[in-house]
Image: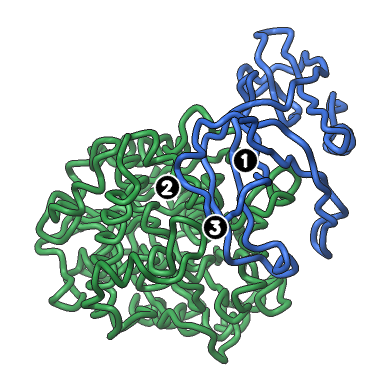
Amino acid sequence: MKKVAVVGVGETKFTGPQFKTEVELFAEAATEAITESNLKPQDIKALFIGNALGDFDEGQGMVQAYAAENIGCLYVPANRYEGACASASIAIRDAFMWVASGYYDIVLAGGIERAATMGTGLATRTFAMFSDARYEYPAGVTFPAVFAMLTHLYADNYKIPLQKLREQMARVTMQSYRHGAINPKGQFYGKNADISLEKVLNSFVVCSPLTLHDCCPFSDGAAAVVLASERVAKKLTDKPVYLTGVGQASCGPLGNQKEYLPRIRAREISSRQAYKMAGKEPQDIDLCELHDCFSIASLIAAEGLGFFEYGKAGEAWEKGEADIGGKVAINPSGGLKSKGHPIGATGAGQVYEITRQLRGEVEPGRQVPDARTGMTDTLGGDGGTLVNMIFERGW
Amino acid sequence: MEQKLYFKDYNEALKQNRILGLKCHSCGALTVPPKMACRQCAGFDLEVTEVKGSGKIKTFTTVYVAAEGRESEIPYILVMVELDEGPWLMGNLEGIDPKTATMALIGRPVKMGNKIFAGDKYSAGEAARPVFSLVE
């Protein structure tokens, strides 16, 4: 396989409901990435776009073809990827494969979603489509419900009193908000930086024990990355960020994961693939953008990725080991919890953050000092799709 | 290849409070709900079998925010139940006030009934769902 580099990234602001269409949002992110790469639309050989629910967001299927044409990438292959909240990450992983194989030298990958535009009722209904529609939705499963059940299971499994676990989860939220408040691209930019533990614990209950502040918002947004072969990358930029490891795994309905829950087995398999390919171990990772759709999800993810012992991630957050300056800097962007979660774009947003962190280009208050190796972790559905990617400085 | 047990048949049985599954002739594992391949060895040599609806609660949540079209159901309790034979089923818990559900539910024995989810414009028709109640 050939070496593959990120040569440019772009991202819209992640927001609540707004007026731009999915094609327009993608164009904003894509043109930023193309321009930053010193390229033109005509240089892009193929597009790989994550979009989970465009059909419901705005009644638009096959958005990838319109998105390609709209930015002047005419007649090139354009593929849409649906892996629930991991849609953009499976798109980027496939884009990587096409370049690594030598078939294409320059491709564009990314994602789009208008989850906020749908409104809470429809968004809750459509997100639930990522659970098993035949055997689990009839009972009324929703996305917060999955992670609420995992929270109770986690407390029972690791013998942590629920109130103590909830306080640890609140610390996760508080850290996410502190970073997200100074991320201009984030949905909660300028908000919640000094939120109190009590306010997190006592906010409205969505699904017991998860309160509003345990949950990520619904978001609109897009993000894009240009991937290029090493040969091309060296001509385009003196700061190529190499994608050195990728992993992906799938899983069936939540009930079929019973041997491992609250662990997400697909993540363990996917991340090990990425570590092995990059020749890295968890301790080599300086920062990680992980899938914190709910505060409990951060704990489960950080343990599954090998950063902390099972049942101990909450303590790690309490001690600052998951923060900038700690063992591994988790979600310096603010993560899904604060930056936002436009599901089809989220994985590309994570890559946007890691790339800019490795280049040393983010706001000083959330820049990980001398970051050299970064990782993404994107989860789709209730563990049904997992993608991990490892990025390294190329200079 | 035909699947040995379809959702349609599983669903019809559930409406009679019966749970159908598949027993693997190769490794002996039990697969519930049905799949094409054995959940343990991926073998296709499966036989339809029936399991009892008794088990214990593994985890739960009380849902306060509904999906579109199900607003009238909140608040309701969602549970994952480990059946005596091993499989985990997702269903509801009835017979207690959803607002009073606590961690004390975990490990409690339950028995199964069912209710029909009428379906919505996305769900390709109705489906039965397990509805559990506490035994003690």
- Please count the marks in the image: 3
Q: Nearer the viewer, residue A31 or A203?
A: A203
Q: Amino acid at mark 3?
A: Lys
Whether residues under marks 1 and 3 lie with C-beta atoms below 8 angstroms apart, the answer is no
Q: Find the distance from the CA under tag 2 to the CA under tag 1.
A: 17 Å
| In the rendered image, the vertical position of residue A235 relative to residue B114, given as above or below | below
The reply to whether residue B57 is visible in this rendering is yes
The hue in which chain A appears in the rendered picture of the protein: green
Chain hosting mark 2: A
Q: Amino acid at mark 2?
A: Thr
Q: Which mark is residue A253?
A: 1
**Chain letter for blue?**
B
Mark 1 lies on a secondary structure that is: loop
Residue A25 at what x, y percent from top left? Answer: 52, 83
Asked whether the residues under marks 2 and 1 belong to the same chain, the reply is: yes
Q: Nearer the viewer, residue A320 or A247?
A: A320
Mark 3 lies on a secondary structure that is: helix
Comparing labels 1 and 3, the label whose residue is closer to the camera: 3
Asked whether the residues under marks 3 and 2 belong to the same chain, the reply is: no
Chain hosting mark 3: B
Q: Mark 2 or mark 1, which has the lower sequence index? A: 2
Q: Which mark is residue A207?
A: none
Q: Quadrant of the N terminus of chain A?
A: top left
Whether residues under marks 3 and 2 lie with C-beta atoms below 8 angstroms apart, the answer is no
Query: Which residue bears the numbered disc 3?
Result: B99
Query: Which residue bears the numbered disc 2?
Result: A151
Residue that sits furthest to the front in the current view: B136
